[in-house]
Structures are given as structure tokens and as C-alpha cells.
Image (spheres, helix red, strand yellow):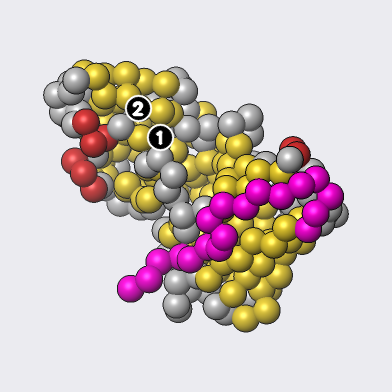
């Protein structure tokens, strides 16, 4: 069975450009999480959805970041405009209600020049 | 608010030696506790978890951890290190609401 799928796996862009990261959760899972991992700040929860509804977005750094989940099988994290300090690995994870275990995707490594 | 402290950002052990990675937590309610492992250029994978019941929890790859409420600890151990154990290990806590708070991670190096 396929795990969490993220695309692209690597993204290099220039400051000021729009970046869109994509995530497909495991089929049947109804909670989805976006994390950011950096050397300085470690692994931070940005936002999470339950049944496609954003539940907690307190970790979203600023208005340049937005996330959507239009249906149960797809989510996007958008950065507009991007800045060099956004360079990080972004992970998507999913789980189903009643389970404590989150399943992580392979991550998207973002470099903003 | 929940938090996790991992003592030692880098730990090195010889192959065959005991692995001990330390984790202390803070939580306002009985916690759920987790250890995840991250291999280079990969996502995180669950090693083991404690929710309720037996305080000694066994996970994959020979790892285990013991929940000690009095010490607010959840240290990860493995009796005999293998080269394939080299990775980064993250302790995490949840207050049962699906939201995980991770520690800063411990990079484990195995010396041949």
C-alpha cells in the first residue's frame, strides 16, 4: 500500500517566487499534518487538518504561508512570496482518528536562493 | 503546554554496545509518548509508542523504552548497537489530541 506521497521531492527557486508543495495522504486517513524541519528550529508543526478542515494553524509562520485541503486525498502548502529563510525540509504526515501514530512522507527539500 | 527535551544532540557508541538516548517531557495531562527514527533523506518512521498500560514498551529493530512518570522520562535503549542503527532519533509527546510536539533530535553514530 502506498504511503504518504509528497511532490516535488526537491525544489530550488528564487526569492520572491511562489512555491507550492503537494501531499497525498494515505487512503482512509482523515487527519493531515504539515511540518517544517530546519537545523535551527528542529521539527515544527505548521498546520493540521481533520476531515479536510484546518484545526490548528498556530504554527504557520506568517501570511506568506497558506495551506489547503480541498478533498480527503490532497493538500497543498503554498509560500508566496518565498524568502531564503523558508529553506527547509517540509514534511507531510497523516493518520486516522483514534490512532496516535502519524505516518510521514519522504519530505520536500526546498531551497530559496 | 507540552514539551520535550532530548539530552545530547549527538551520541556515539561502539558496535555491540548499549544504546541509551534520553528524553524528558512536560505535559499537563497523562501523556502519549513516541520515538521516531529518521534515516538520511527520508521521512520519520515510528519506532515505538506509549499510550497506556505497560510502562516498558518494545518497538521495532530491538529498541525499547520505559515510561517513568516520577522522572517524567521516556528513555530509548537497545542492548547491542548495530551499524544500521545510525540515524537521527526524535522523542515526541502528545496530550491525546493528535498534535505531536517533537524534541530537537539526537544523532546516533555507531563506531565500527
Residues at discs 1 and 2 in contact (Cβ within 8 Å): yes
Tell me what residue is drawn at x 26 percent, y 31 percent.
Answer: B77
Q: Which residue is mark 2?
A: B108
Name the chief secondary structure element in magenta. loop
- The circle drawn on residue B88 is 1
**Secondary structure of the residue carrying numbered label 2:** strand
Give A49 or B30, whichever is nearer the viewer: A49
- Pick whichever of labels 1 and 2 is earlier in the sequence: 1
Q: Quadrant of the N terminus of chain B?
A: top right
Q: Position of residue A33 (x, y in %)?
A: 58, 60
Is residue A3 inside the magenta stretch? yes
Is residue A36 inside the magenta stretch? no
Q: Quadrant of the C terminus of chain B?
A: top left
Give B16 or B69, whichever is nearer the viewer: B16
**Residue B76 appearing in the image:** yes
> Quick one: label 1, few (<14), some, or many (20+) residues within 10 Å?
many
Tell me where the magenta segment starts and ends, as one range.
Answer: A1-18
Side of B108 where A104 appears, left or right = right
Q: Position of residue A47 (x, y in %)?
A: 67, 57
**Secondary structure of the residue carrying numbered label 1:** strand
Quarter where residue B57 is shown: top left
Whether residue A26 is situated above or below residue A103 in the rendered picture:
below
Amino acid at each position: 500500500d502506498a504511503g504518504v506521497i509528497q511532490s516535488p521531492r526537491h525544489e530550488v527557486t528564487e526569492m520572491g517566487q511562489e512555491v507550492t508543495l503537494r501531499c497525498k495522504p494515505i487512503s482512509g486517513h482523515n487527519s493531515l499534518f504539515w511540518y517544517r524541519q530546519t537545523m535551527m528550529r528542529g521539527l515544527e508543526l505548521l498546520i493540521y487538518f481533520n476531515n479536510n478542515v484546518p484545526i490548528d494553524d498556530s504554527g504557520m509562520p506568517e501570511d506568506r504561508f497558506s495551506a489547503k485541503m480541498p478533498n480527503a486525498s490532497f493538500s497543498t502548502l503554498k509560500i508566496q512570496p518565498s524568502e531564503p529563510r523558508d529553506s527547509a525540509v517540509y514534511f507531510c504526515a497523516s493518520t486516522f482518528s483514534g490512532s496516535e501514530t502519524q505516518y510521514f512522507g519522504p519530505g520536500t527539500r526546498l531551497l530559496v536562493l | 503546554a507540552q514539551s520535550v527535551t532530548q539530552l545530547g544532540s549527538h551520541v556515539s557508541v561502539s558496535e555491540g554496545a548499549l544504546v541509551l538516548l534520553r528524553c524528558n517531557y512536560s505535559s499537563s495531562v497523562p501523556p502519549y509518548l513516541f520515538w521516531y527514527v529518521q534515516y538520511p533523506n527520508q521521512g520519520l518512521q515510528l519506532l515505538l509508542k506509549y499510550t497506556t498500560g505497560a510502562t516498558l514498551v518494545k518497538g521495532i529493530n530491538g529498541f525499547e523504552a520505559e515510561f517513568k512518570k516520577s522522572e517524567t522520562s521516556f528513555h530509548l535503549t537497545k542492548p547491542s548497537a548495530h551499524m544500521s542503527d545510525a540515524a537521527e532519533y526524535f522523542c515526541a509527546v502528545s496530550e491525546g489530541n493528535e498534535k505531536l510536539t517533537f524534541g530537537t533530535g539526537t544523532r546516533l553514530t555507531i563506531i565500527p
